[in-house]
Image (tube, grey):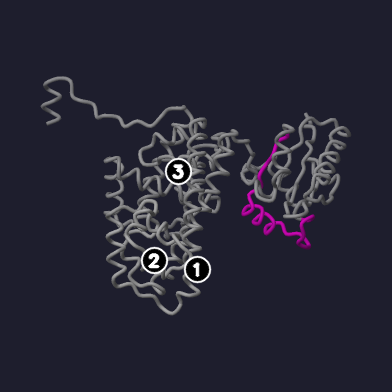
Amino acid sequence: MLVPPKLHVAVDVGCRRHSVAIGLSSGELLEAFDIDHRPEGFQDFFSRIEKHRRRFAMAVPTVAMEGYNGHARPLDSLICERGWRLLNVNNLKLARFKQMFPAAAKSDPIDARRMLDLMQLGEHMPQARRALQEVHAPTLENAKLKRLTRRRRALVEEKSRLLARMQGDLRAVCPGLLDITGDAENRWFLNLLTHGDDLEKLARLREKTLLAIPAIGAKYAARIRQWQQQAQFSHEVAYAGPMIIEDARRILALGQAISALERQCAALAEASDIARLIDTLPGFALVCSSELAGEIGTLDRFAGEASLAVYLGMANLDNSSGTRQGARAPGQVNKRAKAAMMTGVDRHRKQVPESQRYYEKKRAEGKTHNQSIRALGRHLCRVLYRMLQRGEAYCIREPAQPSTHAEQRLAA
């Protein structure tokens, strides 16, 4: 019995233009064209596909895109809204495919046609099918968490860079000022730096003025007064001082923005099943659970717990040859999810004695800290997958107590 051909669409995504190839699963190329990343281009894209759908009387086409999210937005979401099947082409595997079956030249239209070849091959070979990962739309809460947590992480990284720069400038311009605080990120210290527009005037502030600065009380005012007695400024203070004050103001603003994002994440995490379940893992808390929920999106996209472990960066791939035994990191790792997972697992093992014992066992075997954390994270991925699959919260089981007198004596 002959299987009717399917309608395949391949999109090579660019930042301003996308190359599109439409063909049949039998291998026939129907049309190749470019569209602009504009509403007019999207309308042209869908109208051309609809024309071929009506011509061949096909139900739902399969669309493969080289890159999901990023420059593919909002075309990918428009495809999902129509109920069409959307595949995300693994860039690394597509590159290997093009190396094995090279074309005469390299261009975006040629790459789109090669993606059609890969889709045709995926109909018959499981190995090729794994290079085409079906996109399952996440819930609205998890989609929002993904945006918010990525924004939060970007602001945290910006604040860290500003703090490092501000501390270096303070040591050069005003030696000794940093010594009055254990952390330059303390709000009272930043409020002190931003009190005026002239850094040198800090050495002449009276105690009454210091106590009027927010977050500064008698304890911190005494430290500042002690520094004022021996305050010194370098010749750079005239032009570097305003830069320090500007950085301090930006750090304060970033802190407020990060806190606002965390409040939004907390509200969304309550409505997200994935975030609420991950939050029950000791040590993961709001930030890690929100980041992981946003990056995972939906469990439907993973074939099993091993796929989830690879995605979270908690599993290495075997890389052995002959008598040499080795492993390598996979290329399909979500770096943001891996960073959240590493932080959560490290905090988790400090709160769960059994996890701490496993970590210490790996350290005793000669593993580094990160290797031991990943080994523990690999086990937690199994637990996490079952939790999300069954909708069950994490719980620590108490060891069973021996019931009879004889069992108690054997246990002793």
Residue identified by numbered label 1: 242
Residue identified by numbered label 3: 287
Residue depicted at x 45% and y 60%: 194
Q: Is residue 87 magenta?
A: yes
Residue identified by numbered label 2: 202
In front of the other: 131 or 321: 131
Task: Report the amino acid beneath label 2.
Answer: Leu
- Above or below, comparing residue 51 to residue 358 in the picture: above
Chain part drawn in magenta: 84-110
- Counting from the top left corner in percent of width and height, residue 397 is at 30, 30
Judged by depth in the image, the label closer to the viewer, 3 or 2, is 2
User: Is the Cβ of the residue at disc 1 closer than 8 Å to that at disc 3?
Assistant: no
Judged by depth in the image, the label closer to the viewer, 1 or 3, is 1
Q: Which of disc 2 and disc 1 is earlier in sequence?
A: 2
Judged by depth in the image, the label closer to the viewer, 1 or 2, is 2
Q: CA distance from mark 1 to mark 2?
A: 13 Å
Residue depicted at x 33% and y 70%: 176
**Which quadrant, please, contains the C terminus?**
top left
Q: Is residue 310 magenta?
A: no
Residue depicted at x 62% and y 54%: 92
In front of the other: 60 or 42: 42
Task: Report the amino acid beneath label 1.
Answer: Pro
Task: Report the amino acid beneath label 3.
Answer: Val
- Counting from the top left corner in percent of width and height, residue 290 is at 49, 40
Residue depicted at x 46% and y 62%: 196
Q: Which of disc 2 and disc 3 is earlier in sequence?
A: 2
Q: Which of disc 3 and disc 1 is earlier in sequence?
A: 1
Q: CA distance from mark 3 to mark 2?
A: 37 Å
